[in-house]
């Protein structure tokens, strides 16, 4: 009888593996990234899943002719590892034998094997299937993986449980018209704008939960910072004393993530030339105070009393960077009118909420706050907001049956990545963006 | 100026912490799970995020009256840790001081603090916000977290990169009518049935990728094993020699996951009384051979030559359990007619594909196989299947620009969990199920 036993051969070879194989031959499975002809020899750059290795090709020592080595072919190569002090890895790789496993039928319409892909954003995204093969482009998403891994490790250490809530929902959490509707077997259903209701329910169960998953916003904004589908990093924690507990947790989270990247994603940090921000203390300012500070510093009229204009977030960041050296700033106590019905109001001023945004390098990347955990208060707030209490029966059940004081936040993963890399458009940090005009690839 | 510095107080207390605080008082943030009155004293069960601690209440030694301790209240408690050899943890917890942080306005309509929640599936799901607070119910989802963590750790160790692909898509990957449609700013769009196209594209980039995320199937099946939204664990790997490499990887993955659960989720395994399957060798049988084996063993007519009936999967599992002791069996070489257009056909018999299903305790939990990586072959196959080649231009671009031989699989997380726990309905392992009749909570 035939069986499989779980023996996995053909391990992925890393730079570390190569350095342990001095004076030996090693098998590499790779894509041919680039062939650079020199006088009498050539450099052949082999791309593995995370690295690019430069190999030395000399016709006399290799089984194939140079013209057989077509870029974006996939090969099984045997290379000899020669110690070489002057090279970066301390080794030279001599290409000895190549077996072509597959070949492209066409060359890429965009040059992908230079330091940067030199093309428009539109082309970059239209041809994601090849442009992502560029060393720099793919590093963005490897680093994004690292951000997520760091977040998960931190939250797990802090006893948060990872959950997965449904994306097809009966009602939106954020209200408003910015919601995608679909036909669900003859009934109306919606795509989740956030896991808000579910993560709150799960606080009653696990006390601390997090979710990292897609959310959907049918916003008609066509800007450099909006997406219609993005990855939301959400956490929610019970037994808080104040909404500041959540800001403290986020501060510790950020510090952990940057350390985690430093330790595990050095390769990508170098390729992308990332300067990781220092997270010592993060300054905190009330929303109205921030408005006034911007007005006074830049002699700008306050035109919107309920929210920031994008320019104001930018200016606020500038002020705090200059005054404190911090690239992050927490803005708190947003007006009740602008925050969703589940947000807890301040006991001192019911026009203000116990909520916050985190602004990073000029753009809001997090919204969070304390939630109403008492049944009567939540019912009152719904009525006060003119909402239909009966529609929220299932949501309110948790309040009725007992909830700890709690709060949480949502962080936009693509936006955060994009700020970290100082990109001028969030789409550069989005694997396959969805916006007003883009639904492919 | 106000600042936060990332100091997180109020750590979650675990059993391990308690044992280190002998003869001391410790602060516990918890929900009151159960109050059991005895003669002259009471047991008060405190539920934290992962554990339940039994405390001894005596009126003389505590600041509150017993009737103040209402089930599902949230409290800050001070308990004295008394060494006690006869107790399971080696300690007794004496309730000394309780501060009530919040109280329910109503008792749960369903008893949740017995060993099992004794109610219908319908009620269990309708009242998820409370029934999940039951120690056993929530353990299912803590264990499910562990399955996912184990999978991630294994795949990361094997150099797979985690990706997140869009869920709003231009076309389905699996074809057919089982797809949810939505209005995307005046255009038709669909909910992803699988990350198939994207994970293949990303094999060209990272060579090995995985994604754990929601997928959507508009199937009108109302069965104990179908969901309309579920979590798919997908991986895809380049540079395979045969589709058996994928089965080997899955075999190793399963072995790792069970070991990981044994090491990190002992608490839940005990509560749920899980007997983890042994993964030594997994037997492999061809689809037609399996059909014949079932026919001959049970004297059943073969009525469907292209697929299994659910009963046949069950019988096949029985045969292999009896003959080999394995609770898993791989079935390979499914008919080309029943497999999607990207599946590679066998070179020996073009009616058969290089594909497999994994059957676990009578139910299919994985579908996988080798994909067509050559441009011309993929175009031919599309034509042969009567599909519109032009519609797949963006998908075919990756084949054109070069792809390694590759393949992968998808594993249904809820189904896998449900089989592991020997449940008779996949909904028991689904946090908030979506089916023909259920869109809430």
Image: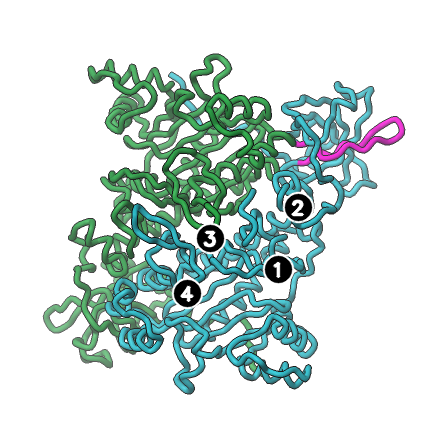
Chain colours: A green, B cyan
Q: Chain of mark 2?
A: B
Q: Are marks 2 and 3 in contact (CB under 8 Å)?
A: no
What count of labels does the image hold?
4
Q: Are marks 3 and 1 on the same chain?
A: yes
Q: Which residue is mark 2?
A: B124
Q: First in sequence: mark 3 or mark 4?
A: 4
Q: First in sequence: mark 3 or mark 1?
A: 3
Q: Are marks 3 and 4 on the same chain?
A: yes
Q: CA distance from mark 3 to mark 4?
A: 15 Å
Q: CA distance from mark 3 to mark 1?
A: 19 Å
- Say left or right for B305 vs B171: right
Q: Which mark is residue B224?
A: 1
- Say left or right for A330 vs B63: left
The span picked out in magenta is B31-47
Mark 2, secondary structure of its residue:
helix
Foreground residue, A334 or A106?
A: A334
Q: Main secondary structure of the magenta part?
A: strand
What residue is drawn where x is 22% and y is 16%? A301
- The furthest residue to the left: A39
Q: Which mark is residue B174?
A: 4
């Amino acid at each position: 009888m035939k069986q499989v036993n779980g023996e996995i051969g053909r391990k992925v070879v890393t730079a570390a593996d190569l350095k342990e194989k001095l004076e030996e031959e090693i098998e590499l499975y790779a894509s041919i990234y680039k062939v650079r002809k020199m006088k009498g020899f050539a450099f052949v750059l082999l791309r593995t899943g995370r690295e690019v290795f430069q190999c030395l090709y000399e016709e006399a020592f290799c089984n194939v002719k140079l013209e057989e080595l077509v870029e974006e072919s996939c090969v099984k190569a045997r290379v000899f590892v020669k110690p070489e002090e002057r090279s970066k890895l301390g080794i030279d790789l001599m290409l000895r034998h190549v077996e072509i496993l597959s070949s492209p039928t066409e060359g890429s319409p965009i040059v992908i094997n230079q330091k940067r892909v030199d093309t428009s954003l539109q082309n970059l995204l239209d041809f994601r299937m090849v442009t992502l093969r560029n060393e720099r482009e793919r590093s963005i998403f490897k680093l994004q993986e690292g951000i997520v891994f760091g977040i998960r490790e931190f939250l797990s250490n802090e006893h948060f449980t990872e959950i997965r809530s449904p994306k097809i929902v009966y009602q939106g959490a954020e209200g408003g018209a910015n919601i995608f509707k679909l036909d669900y077997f003859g009934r109306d259903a919606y795509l989740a704008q956030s896991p808000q209701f579910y993560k709150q329910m799960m606080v009653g169960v696990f006390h601390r939960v997090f979710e990292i998953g897609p959310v959907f916003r049918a916003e008609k904004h066509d800007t450099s910072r909006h997406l219609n589908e993005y990855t939301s990093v959400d956490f929610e924690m019970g037994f808080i004393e104040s909404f500041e507990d959540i800001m403290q947790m986020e501060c510790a989270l950020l510090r952990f993530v940057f350390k985690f990247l430093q330790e595990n994603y050095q390769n990508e940090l170098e390729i992308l030339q990332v300067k990781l921000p220092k997270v010592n203390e993060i300054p905190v300012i009330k929303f109205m105070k921030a408005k006034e500070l911007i007005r006074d510093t830049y002699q700008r009229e306050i035109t919107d009393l309920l929210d920031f204009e994008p320019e104001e977030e930018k200016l606020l960041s500038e002020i705090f960077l200059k005054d404190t050296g911090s690239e992050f700033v927490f803005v708190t106590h947003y007006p009740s009118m602008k925050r969703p019905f589940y947000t807890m109001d301040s006991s001192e001023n019911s026009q203000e909420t116990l909520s916050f945004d985190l602004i990073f390098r000029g753009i809001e990347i997090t919204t969070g706050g304390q939630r109403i955990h008492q049944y009567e208060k939540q019912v009152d707030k719904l009525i006060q907001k003119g909402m239909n209490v009966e529609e929220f029966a299932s949501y309110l059940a948790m309040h009725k049956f007992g909830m700890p004081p709690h709060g949480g936040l949502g962080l936009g993963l693509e936006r955060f990545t994009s700020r970290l890399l100082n990109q001028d458009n969030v789409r550069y940090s989005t694997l396959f963006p969805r916006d007003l005009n883009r639904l492919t690839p």
